[in-house]
């Protein structure tokens, strides 16, 4: 076996795993490994904040299927990854975090930049593992990739900074020698039960989730939907899990999703949930519609056994790869049932079309509400902006990344895709400052595609410092920034529950477009649909980083995220009595 250093062993694992780049900020703790990257053929993407590297690699993996890798300086460099890693963990995105720690001889002395990151990351990773000896560096790296892929999530590798140095003899293994490719149909006996449940359905609805995208089985789900005559809803913020130009598409469920999908799902007696954990937040009542039917029988397909029946009781649970299980189930359904005729399908087409038209008319009416001015400037309704952006994304087959907040969440009503792997959202961790960083990773993954991010001015304040990164690495991401002057999602809570007392909700900026220009990007400031459309077209044509600042009305607000989690205030102390809800007018 060849002689090598721990750094060389780790680098060779990265090479054999097909890693072409690593994101982070350079630091002395891992400089011995960093020094090997150019010779190993690995690019180092130097960001302005480590959180960005985590979001970049999250998006990169969602589009390529390859686990992203990040690295940072021990202590504060690694702790800056926390939010991004927690997001990836909730999103089931494989990722490896190389986490140098204090030197082995000084651990526990509270030395410079010491932090117990190993324990810090345990709750937000699939595994937090340590390199116990320099000779184990390569083995632990292999374990990290094996675990990240098997359990679909991030894994932290803690390595004392002095363990990058030394000597060892080790065989360089190929991935197939230490990890198994995903796949399989699980328990075959369960499929017979699933067929019987589906066969007896009167109102079957298919719910397509992230697993349909990851496993590349959209076509199979389409064929199965037509065979069964079943409408299809997509899960919360996975709008690309089913093509919107298919006649069975009803839109996404979840916050600010499609009322058409919710009304149709509400009537289901059987739900075929494919590649989804049916998350708690993603199936809560919306628009005062308690749409997820408690009496419906659920056939759930998910690759993770811990996600089967986690939030909703199931009739049949198929712990399996979404593609393999869908193909097996479809084959058995074809043997047990006859395909629906055109005459039988027509009423379903008509019903879906009618529900969608009703929903489109409703959001069109909301978008035409009157808007105001700010500092003498005419403003746009945020929905009018999203109409243009949504159409642009659809027409250009663009990748759209979304943040969290009033405008970003409302985009759930407007983002429609013909193809999978086009929608990258922060999902149920719901952190601001995700969309632009993720867009950089999406552009790395798909350099020829148009990539557009959607963020309000609050989230953009946590993102704009990465514009120079986009310029430095020539990543022509189009950032659409909705300048509404407030943290509008929380502002809505203060309106509904705190009698219009606004504390901390206002945001001020001179010009995000000019800030973008100062950082090397193209800047545009718009306040109408025509100028927005022109700016998008020009930005795409120029293929340069662009910041499009859209002046929107901060009083055109979406409903609260969690009306059930808030309550009107009660105050007992005399000094706060005037703030009690009983005194509201």
Image (spheres, helix red, strand yellow):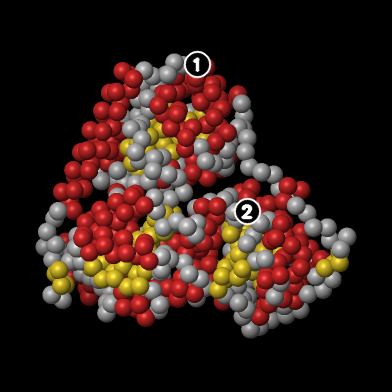
Which type of secondary structure does the marked residue at label 2 adopt?
helix
Q: Which residue carries the number 2 mark?
A: 148
Task: Indicate whether 393 appears above or below 324.
Answer: below
**Marks 1 and 2: which is nearer the front?**
1
Q: Is residue 215 left or right of residue 164?
A: left
Residue 195 horizontal/vertical position (percent): 50, 22
| Residue 256 can be seen in this image | no
**Circle 2 residues within 10 Å: few <14, some 14–19, many ≥20:** many
Q: Is residue 2 left or right of residue 59?
A: right
Identity of the residue drawn at 38% across and 31% down: 205
Task: Indicate whether 499 appears above or below 313.
Answer: below
As drawn, which residue projects farthest toward the right? 1
> Nearest the camera: 144 or 538?
538
Q: Which mark is residue 166?
A: none
Quarter of the picture holding the C terminus: bottom left
Task: Indicate whether 332 appears above or below 155.
Answer: above
Residue 433 horizontal/vertical position (percent): 41, 66
Identity of the residue drawn at 13% across and 55% down: 369
**Circle 1 residues within 10 Å: few <14, some 14–19, many ≥20:** few
> Nearest the camera: 551 or 187?
551
In this rendering, the count of numbered labels is 2
Identity of the residue drawn at 45% across and 56% down: 449
Q: Is residue 223 left or right of residue 258?
A: right
Q: Earlier in the sequence, mark 1 or mark 2?
A: 2
Q: Find residue 120 and report its image quarter.
A: bottom right
Which type of secondary structure does the marked residue at label 1 adopt?
helix
As drawn, which residue projects farthest toward the front? 541
| Residue 189 can be seen in this image | yes
Identity of the residue drawn at 15% across and 76% down: 375
Q: Which residue carries the number 1 mark?
A: 336
> Nearest the camera: 23 or 115?
23
């Amino acid at each position: 076996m060849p002689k090598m250093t721990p750094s060389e062993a780790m680098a060779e694992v990265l090479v054999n795993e097909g890693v072409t780049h690593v994101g982070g900020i350079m630091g002395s703790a891992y400089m011995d490994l960093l020094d090997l990257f150019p010779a190993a053929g690995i690019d180092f993407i130097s960001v302005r904040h480590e959180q960005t590297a985590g979001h970049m690699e999250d998006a990169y993996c969602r589009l390529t299927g390859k686990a992203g890798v990040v690295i940072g300086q021990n202590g504060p460099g690694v702790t800056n990854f926390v939010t991004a890693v927690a997001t990836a963990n909730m999103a089931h995105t494989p990722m490896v975090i190389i986490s140098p720690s204090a030197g082995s001889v000084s651990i526990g002395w509270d030395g410079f930049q010491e932090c117990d990151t190993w324990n810090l990351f345990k709750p937000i990773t699939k595994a937090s593992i340590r390199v116990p000896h320099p000779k184990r560096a390569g083995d632990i790296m292999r374990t990290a990739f094996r675990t990240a892929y098997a359990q679909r999530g991030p894994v932290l590798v803690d390595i004392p900074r002095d363990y990058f140095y030394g000597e060892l003899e080790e065989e360089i293994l190929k991935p197939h020698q230490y990890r198994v490719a995903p796949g399989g149909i699980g328990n075959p006996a369960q499929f017979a039960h699933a067929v019987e449940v589906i066969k007896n359905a009167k109102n079957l609805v298919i719910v397509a989730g992230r697993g349909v995208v990851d496993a590349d089985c959209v076509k199979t789900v389409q064929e199965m939907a037509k065979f069964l005559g079943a409408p299809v809803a997509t899960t919360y913020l996975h709008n690309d899990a089913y093509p919107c130009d298919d006649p069975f598409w009803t839109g996404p469920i979840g916050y600010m999703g499609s009322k058409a999908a919710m009304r149709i799902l509400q009537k289901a007696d059987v739900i075929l949930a494919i590649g989804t954990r049916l998350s708690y937040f993603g199936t809560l009542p919306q628009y005062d519609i308690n749409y997820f039917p408690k009496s419906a029988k659920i056939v759930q397909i998910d690759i993770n056994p811990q996600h089967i029946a986690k939030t909703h009781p199931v009739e049949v649970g198929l712990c399996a790869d979404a593609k393999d299980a869908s193909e097996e189930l479809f084959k058995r359904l074809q043997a047990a049932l006859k395909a629906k005729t055109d005459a039988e399908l027509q009423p379903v087409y008509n019903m879906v079309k009618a529900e969608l038209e009703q929903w489109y008319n409703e959001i069109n009416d909301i978008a035409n509400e009157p808007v105001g001015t700010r500092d003498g400037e005419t403003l746009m309704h945020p929905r009018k902006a999203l109409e243009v952006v949504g159409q642009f994304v659809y027409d250009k087959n663009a990748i759209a990344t979304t943040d969290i907040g009033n405008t970003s969440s409302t985009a759930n009503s407007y983002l429609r895709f013909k193809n999978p792997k086009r929608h990258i959202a922060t999902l149920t961790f719901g952190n601001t400052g995700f969309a632009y960083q993720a867009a950089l990773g999406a552009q790395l993954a798909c350099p020829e595609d148009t990539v557009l991010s959607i963020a309000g001015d609050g989230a953009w304040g946590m993102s704009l410092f990465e514009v120079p990164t986009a310029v430095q690495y020539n990543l022509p991401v189009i950032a659409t920034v909705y300048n509404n002057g407030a943290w509008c999602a929380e502002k809505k809570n203060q309106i509904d529950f705190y009698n219009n007392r606004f504390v901390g909700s206002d945001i001020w900026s001179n010009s995000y477009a000019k800030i973008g220009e100062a950082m090397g990007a193209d800047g545009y400031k718009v306040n109408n649909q025509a100028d927005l459309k022109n700016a998008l077209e020009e930005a795409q044509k120029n293929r340069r980083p662009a910041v499009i600042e859209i002046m929107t009305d901060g009083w055109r607000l979406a409903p609260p995220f969690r009306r059930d989690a808030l309550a009107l205030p009660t105050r007992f102390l005399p000094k706060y009595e005037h703030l009690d809800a009983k005194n509201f007018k």
